[in-house]
Amino acid sequence: MALETLKDVARKILGASSVDKKFVEEIIKDIQRALIKADVNVKQVKEISDSIRKRASSEEVLPGLTTKEHVLKIVYEELLKGVGEGLEIPLKKCKIMLIGLHGSGKTTTAVKIAKFYKDYGLKTAVIAADTFRPAAYEQLKQLAESYKVGFYGEKDGKNSVEIVVRGLENLKDYDMLIVDTAGRHALEDDLIKEMKEIAKALDPDYKFLVVDAATGQLAAKQAKAFHDAVKIDGIIVTKFDGTAKGGGALSAAREIGIPIAFIGTGEKVEDFEKFDPTSFVSRLLGMGDVKSLMEKVERIVKEEEIDAEAFLKGTFTLKDIYKQIEAIEKMGPIRKVFEMLPFLGLKVNDDAIEVTQEKMKKFKVMMDSMTEEELLNPKILDSSRIRRIAIGSGTSIQEVKELLKYYETMKSLMKKVKKGRIPIKGLKI
């Protein structure tokens, strides 16, 4: 993604031997290239550039900051202004209506929202009101069942408004309802009419426009047309991962003054996050996003029923290790987890990531070959049991011993943390 090159800008600033007017101009040109390549509106690129230039030459360096840190702070704050605002959705009963053109990813997004808030403890459900696309009903039904969220739809239903009305009645005990509506290849009169009728029947708390990140600067025109037609409350940008045009969707939101609610960062239902401007810009610059990482950890730990207290006391079992590995896998690709950590300038080795992922998979296969007794009491694992596990899992004796060594290392580490011998900032025991 073109915006990823902004990490190089941050590294360049912090790695500079001196910061003068010429260096600032170099940085501005680097930022301009990254933003234009990402399809950010040229007018906005100019505004960001002019503001960085003006502030870097006129503002005094704050006490405690170096000149380099001062310039990076300015770049961060101006990019923050450029990406617009996020939208906070309270954890309470509400109805959400998704609208957008054909192929924007509304159906998958409906389940992504449902899964996201289900992890926060809400009882969520989706309604299949897209009667235009034949496969929409089956796709939504299968996804909803896979992620154990509520579902209502009528396979051969033709009237989307009536489906929504019946869906509201059938799902009245749910906290959050997300309605997937039909799209077209363009914003046509019949689509506008249907959206207005559904909105009247549903009375949604939020109407979200779902936009494909690859739409680029055309997203502004699209968003304005939908907003004029039905007054949207926010934008959801899908397929943001791997596109060079994602900046166009972001600048579109800022241009028409509509907040961005969520970003879809991949094809999986788990690849979805609430749009937080500060976290987003921090990650763009390689400064990490510990806040989002901790929120994700809390949701997944709760879902996997991991006993955090047992880990801190060092009394956990191999069964707990198994749950821990499953939780890590649910957090998404390890590379994305690393990107949330504040290691500015650290380039994660692809080979090392691949080895780590393969090792975790092998650990799970080994534990699948163990008995319940062995998982709960690893001390009984003698040489004959280890040999049996290696054969059963298609691994080696050495690899099984490596798993046991990992288990013992984790126990020792957690005991040290509990005693305060390894201080972890922000950890409450």
Image (cartoon, rainbow, N blue to C red):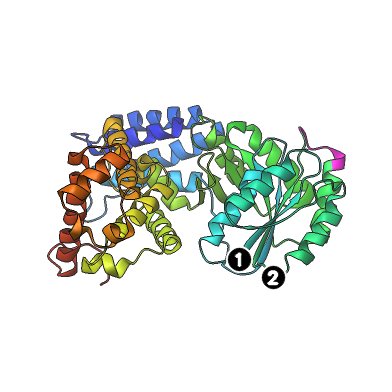
User: Could you tell me residue 199's position as x and y percent?
Assistant: 79, 56
Q: Residue at x 80, y 51 (%)?
A: 154
Residue 123 has which mark? 1
Q: Of callouts 2 and 1, which one flags the residue occurring earlier in the amino acid sequence?
A: 1
Magenta-drawn stretch contains 116: no
- Give neighbour class at mark 2: few <14, some 14-19, many 20+ (Cα, 10 Å): few
Contact, CB < 8 Å: mark 2 with mark 1? yes
Q: Which residue is mark 2?
A: 173
Residue ID at (35%, 30%): 25
- Quarter of image, res 310: bottom left
In the rendered structure, which amino acid carries the disc numbered 1? Lys
For the record, the magenta segment spans: 185-190
Q: Main secondary structure of the magenta part?
A: loop
Q: Is residue 25 visible?
A: yes
- The location of residue 79, given as percent across then percent down, is 44, 43
C-alpha separation, residue under disc 2 versus residue under disc 1: 8 Å
Q: Quadrant of residue 354?
A: top left
Looking at the image, residue 304 lies above or below residue 108: below
Instruction: Name the foreground residue: 160 vs 92.
Output: 160
Image vertical order of residue 233 relative to residue 133, above or below? below
Q: Does 189 appear in magenta?
A: yes
Secondary structure beneath label 1: loop
User: Which image quadrant: the C terminus?
Assistant: bottom left
Q: Is residue 62 above or below residue 225?
A: below
Question: How many numbered discs sit on the rendered protein?
Answer: 2
Residue 351, by quadrant, is top left
* Amino acid type of the residue that numbered disc 2 sits on in the rendered structure: Asp
Instruction: Point out the image quarter for the N terminus.
Output: top left
In the rendered image, the residue lying farthest to the left is 421
- In this view, the residue in front, 74 or 114, is 114
Pointer 1 local density, CA inside 10 Å: few below 14, some 14–19, many at least 20 = some
In this view, the residue farthest toward the bottom is: 429
